[in-house]
Image (cartoon, rainbow, N blue to C red):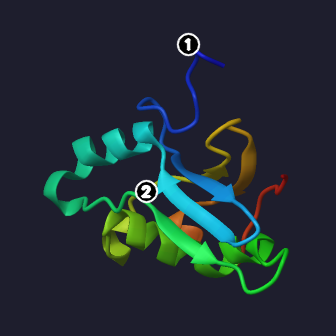
Amino acid sequence: MRGSARPGSDDDGRIVIYQSTDREGSTFSLSPATRRKLEERFGDNFQVTPRIFVAHAKSGSFERLHGRQAKQLLALLTGFDNDLMGQLGDIEFRNPVTDQLILTDPGPAGLSGNVSGQQSR
């Protein structure tokens, strides 16, 4: 995949959130390309949080996390209010090591708690 347009690259509208999961919970962060793109587009309105850790109450609960908390995770990672988040494109949750797609979401405008897309580990 190196050398080709990757998810979260500056030439597409997707927001890539990397998700690392272990038995304790998940750590979320914006991909470097997404971070650069948002800094260029939104300037001082973009207040990046490097990482967010969310503990899981029980094994397997991370699979249900996206639908209920995707909007909140994005707001915490970007510092954006609802108006600014409404200007963002589709969201992809990806593994930061393999770049494997974990889940896609129709974007902040569609983040109502229902998640569409595919999940894999």
Residues under labels 1 and 2: Cα distance? 25 Å
- Residue at screen point 25% across, 62% down: 47
The residue identified by callout 2 is 88
Q: Is residue 25 left or right of residue 70?
A: right
- Residue at screen point 32% across, 39% down: 36
- Residue at screen point 33% across, 73% down: 83
Could you say which is closer to the camera, residue 42 or residue 50? 50
- Visible in this render: residue 74? yes
Location of residue 28 in the rendering, given as x and y in whole percent from the top left corner: 54, 61
- In the displayed structure, would residue 25 be above or below residue 8? below
Mark 1, secondary structure of its residue: loop
Q: Amino acid at mark 1?
A: Gly
Could you say which is closer to the camera, residue 47 or residue 108? 47
Q: Is residue 23 left or right of residue 27?
A: right
Mark 2, secondary structure of its residue: loop
Location of residue 76 in the rendering, given as x and y in whole percent from the top left corner: 40, 72
Location of residue 88 (image quadrant): bottom left
- Visible in this render: residue 91? no
- Residue at screen point 65% across, 38% down: 97
Location of residue 117 in the rendering, given as x and y in whole percent from the top left corner: 78, 57
Residue 3: mark: 1
